[in-house]
Amino acid sequence: MKVIICGTGQVGWQIARHLSGEKNDVTVVDSNGDLVRRATEALDVQGVTGFASYPDVLERAGASDADMIIAATHSDEVNMVICQVAHSVFGITRKIARLRAQSYMDAIYSDLYRRDHLPIDVVISPEREVAEAALQRLSAPMAFDTESFMDGRAQLLGIALDEDCPVLNTPLRQLTDLFSTLRAIVVAIRREGRLFAPEPGDQLFAGDQVYVFSHIDDVTRTLDIFGKVTKKQERVVIIGGGNVGLAVARALETRTDRIRAKVIERSRAQAERAADALTRTIVLNGDGLDAEILAEANIERADAVLVVTDDDKTNILAAVRAKQAGAAMAIALVNDPTLVPLMAALDIDAYINPRATTVSSILRHIRHGRVRAIYSIGDAEAEVIEAQVLSTSLIAGRLVRDIEFPEGVLLGALMKGDKVVKPTGDTKVEENDVIALFAMAGDVPEVERLLQVSIDFF
């Protein structure tokens, strides 16, 4: 597949890294020559320096025979023009644009992106994706990472194992025997910084971070088995009243369990905008690092604090301060993946990586086969892939035990119709089933081969 990626910032870089690693023909375009040079030297990609919205620049990038263009520059308007030029001048069939401004995302204007208007096939909104990720974290407060799959019927849980975890030093196959009715599977373990797909004989140790696939009805029991007692979230403090914080607060207001939320926003203008948009949420104008404003927000009684400003260091410091002031749980928005190892040392319970969230959204629309969802884990170390099994797939009609999955791949869940089941060796994978797989990054191409469909299905 020939792909042009416009913008080599954090998101563009990761997409280029993924696609070039899977032997696609990738060209990156950016007006910053240093970023283009960095990409071409570190990745197996071609580079063009120039403004990606200019037709002559896209022509130099090979737009005349490209299969897809991804517009991920820092400007919404430039991304829109890129897609228009790609469509009108070069006839590129698949156009993906990242748009930040919420006005562009309003449902009443969705007609804007029709092929005869502004031809964008897929619109990615980082703010909406991140807000949804924040709500996912709040829904499973004892997990450091979480994502929903299979139409909300299954949940991926990232669980940090403490010294008092009841199942330490227990082989995974024995867990299956001990909890035979539990619809949950450990699909990955991070130990001393290394992520891997475990074998049935592997044991769990204190300090491990495990990724568990669970049926939605078994999430609480799963967390309990791994030593995490769930507590209902009733009071939430959100530090940062921008697009992300505002979207989370709005979503909390619509919940039936009546969570009481407060928003702290440093900018007076932004605080007033948030106050006007919210009905039941208290908005405080002040610095989230200020002890007095935290006290005014009753941080010591908060079940969770969510820090979503546009600065990583502020988010980390504010999360630490909130925990020290008595907040039961802290979640921080962190763009820089190199800061993630600090989270546990600083007693920050969970984090949200906007880059990984946006990359996951874009990858969902790139993968071969009937891919329904993708979630990127860590610094693009692995992926959880949800896909529909078609008749032409190499795994259709076979028992799980007979499928030659790569060493770094584990089947986490399987949905037949609307019923999610825990897969065993005797489970038969059939056409139209939906499967969820954990795959190390190097094994993704083989997973795609197993899921590959004929050209008739595109």
Image (cartoon, rainbow, N blue to C red):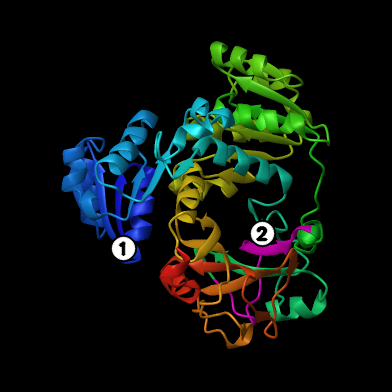
| Left or right: 70 as drawn, with respect to 255 | left
Q: Is residue 329 visible?
A: yes
Above or below — where is 432 with respect to 314? below
Splitting the image into 4 quarters, where does residue 160 fall? bottom right
- In the rendered image, is residue 326 in sight? no
Amino acid identity at mark 1: Asn
Horizontal side of residue 415 vs 120, given as left or right = right
Q: Of residues 4 and 290, which is closer to you in this image?
A: 4
Query: In what element is the residue under mark 2?
Result: loop
Mark 2 surroundings: few (<14), some (14-19) or many (≥20) residues within 10 A: many
| Total labels drawn | 2
Q: How would you classify the magenta stretch by its main secondary structure? A: loop
Q: Residue at x 26, y 35 (%)?
A: 53
Residue 179 sits above or below residue 69 on the image: below
Q: CA distance from mark 2 to mark 1?
A: 28 Å
Query: x, y (%) of residue 383?
Result: 51, 61
Query: Residue 201, percent across and down?
Result: 64, 82
Residue indicated by mark 2: 150
The magenta segment: 197-216
Q: Does the stretch in magenta take in 52? A: no
Q: Where does residue 335 sit, x and y in percent of width and height?
A: 46, 41
* Left or right: 226 in relation to 267: right
Residue 209: x, y in percent? Answer: 61, 61
User: Callout 1: 10 Å neighbours few (<14), some, many (20+)?
Assistant: some
Q: Which mark is residue 158?
A: none
Q: Is residue 68 above or below residue 428?
A: above
Instruction: Please state which of residues 434 and 191 is positioned toward the viewer in this rendering.
Output: 434
Q: Quadrant of the C terminus?
A: bottom left
Kind of residue indicated by mark 2? Met
Q: Which residue is mark 1?
A: 24
Q: Quadrant of the N terminus?
A: bottom left
* Residue 207 forms part of the magenta stretch: yes
